[in-house]
Image (cartoon, rainbow, N blue to C red):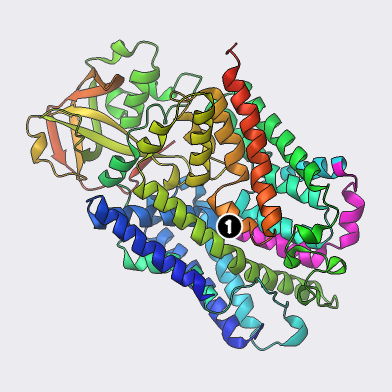
Amino acid sequence: MSGSRLHRSFQALILALLGLFLLNKLWNGTVLWYINSRFLPLTVIGAFGLLWLAQVRLANLQSTGEAEPARHASSPSTWGLLVLAFPILLGLLIPPAPLGASAVANRGFAAVAPARAGGSPAQLELLPTDRTVLDWVRAVNYGADPAAYAGEPADVIGFVYHDPRLTAGEFLLARFTLTCCVADAAAIGMIVRWPAAAELATNGWVRVQGPVQLGELEGRRMPVIEAQSVEAVPPPDQPYIYN
Amino acid sequence: MPRFALGLALGLALMVWLAGLRGAKLGDQLSAFSTVFLGIFIEAAPFLLLGTLASGLVEVFASPDLLRHRIPSGALGGALAGTALGFLFPVCECGTVPLARRLFRKGLPVSAGVAFLLAAPVVNPIVLASTAAAFGFGSLLVWRFALTVVIASVTGLIFSVETRPQRLLRPSALPTLQGGSQALATAWPRRTWAQDLNRALLVAGDEFFEMGRYLVLGSGLAAAMQTFIPQSRLLALGSGPLLSVLVMLGLAVLLSVCSTVDSFVALAFLGTFSPGSVLAFLVYGPMVDLKSILMFRQVFKRRGLLYLVLIPLVLTIAVTVTMNLLPTP
């Protein structure tokens, strides 16, 4: 059965489905929920590579004997091929979603993860209102004089995370930073003071405007926004901040 | 192999159970699991594909003589040459395993192949660049590369003590003359270039399924770890010169982060852990993690696998714990 047509057809089917699965994720943009955008070219190559392999398999369905590289004992059986269909199955069964509040609870906030050691972060030269959550976290942790940022206006978006360590009238405006894929995602955030914090739904995306102050959470320096406005916004196409 | 399907089903059931135990919202947890799993898989699949393509091309176009003339046959030379091979194939562990197995079949000495497997994920321009981006051109970068080269070569040397590769390698990774499985070696009369390419692609496809199973399984385990075991609990385990190294090694194996980016993950621990412990993460993680152990099983017999996992582990612990014990300069 080593080179049975059924086996080959099955391989071709799964290879093609995997390729189409990747293309679909690329097409509708949800691939950005999984990996850093700088890897997109590689994903495109991967998708077409899989389709190519599928095509070669189909083209060789008729050929027999010597055209066939023989298989050895450790090769998967026809049923074993199904393991490679697991990613597709999971993608279909579980509605895709970017990492959110539940993952923050498990991972905790990264102490210094998003920083690049050495060198001054260029982002600090941005206009205060152009800075992202990551830029602010870097500014208060690595800026030469964190106190200098106090009072500057922030205008940032993120998702709501109700951290149990915060007091009433506060919530965390959280983002995930990503270097490679979501396996290395690190949660960062700013504390937002907002009287109606409790009314905000966990995981909902909001835009927060207001002056920044220096604060602390369990001994770690954190940027705090004295919010003047908090409005709900649709989730951004790129949910993560790339490192 | 129904064992596999059964394993996956059991794993999923276990996750559901764990999620229920922790009283978390099951939907949220499963969704996070699915996202992390697909993240690792989508990221790694192209690398695996490139590795299997390289393997297919080696199978069809590289003759065993070529290797025999280029790779020194002495143990030390072989180990060093294997380490140097890493520069030529800048892929992470998902890509090196299929390639190494093919090179073994072409007669690459075990010592050189082992050194290649251990060193290639770190000793390459991409990882050099990402490590420099995270830590700057400092002592940690130098230590990471030096220690990786030393451990890879020493492990290769130790492997060369066993002169019968068939005691370490699975038949599918052996050259036919040394008792390798005959099936793989069926003579294929060389014809046109297009036919050769066609065959290389067929080989690559078979290997994609063979190695891909372990990528799926390893990604699943790593994603489950990340979703269901709070990182704070792992970190709370260890301080102290030995324990902190062990915790970082455990994290490296369980998280299975690709070597091209693990520097940025390690950076997060530099505040909490000593440089020695972070170095252990950076050196051992690329050599051995959940997904690579599963893939190594396709190349090595149990004894070989044990050596491959344990020798670098002991060496890493010895060096990094010593670093932790020495007073910081």
Question: In which quarter of the view is residue A28 placed?
Answer: bottom left
| Residue B257 visible in this rendered orientation of the protein | no
Q: Residue B95's x, y, as percent?
A: 64, 54
Q: Is residue A88 above or below residue B40?
A: below
Q: Is residue B16 above or below residue B134?
A: below
Question: In which quarter of the view is residue B133 placed?
Answer: top right
Chain of the residue displaying label 1: B
Q: How many marks?
A: 1
Mark 1: amino acid: Leu
Residue B63 is a magenta residue: yes
A26 or A104, nearer to the observer: A104
Q: Is residue A27 left or right of residue B187?
A: left
Give the residue displayed 53% in from the left and 44% down from the top: B253
Give the residue displayed 63% in from the left and 39% down from the top: B313
Secondary structure mostly seen in the magenta stretch: helix
Q: Residue B185's x, y, as percent?
A: 80, 73
Give the residue displayed 51% in from the left and 23% down from the top: B274
The segment highlighted magenta reads B47-75
Q: Is residue B135 left or right of residue B104?
A: left
Q: Is residue B319 above or below residue A205?
A: above
Q: Secondary structure at mark 1?
A: helix
Crowding at dot 1, Cα within 10 Å, few <14 / some 14-19 / many 20+, comes out as some
B280 or A69, nearer to the observer: B280
Residue B127 is a magenta residue: no
| Residue B268 visible in this rendered orientation of the protein | yes
Quickly name the residue at label 1.
B294
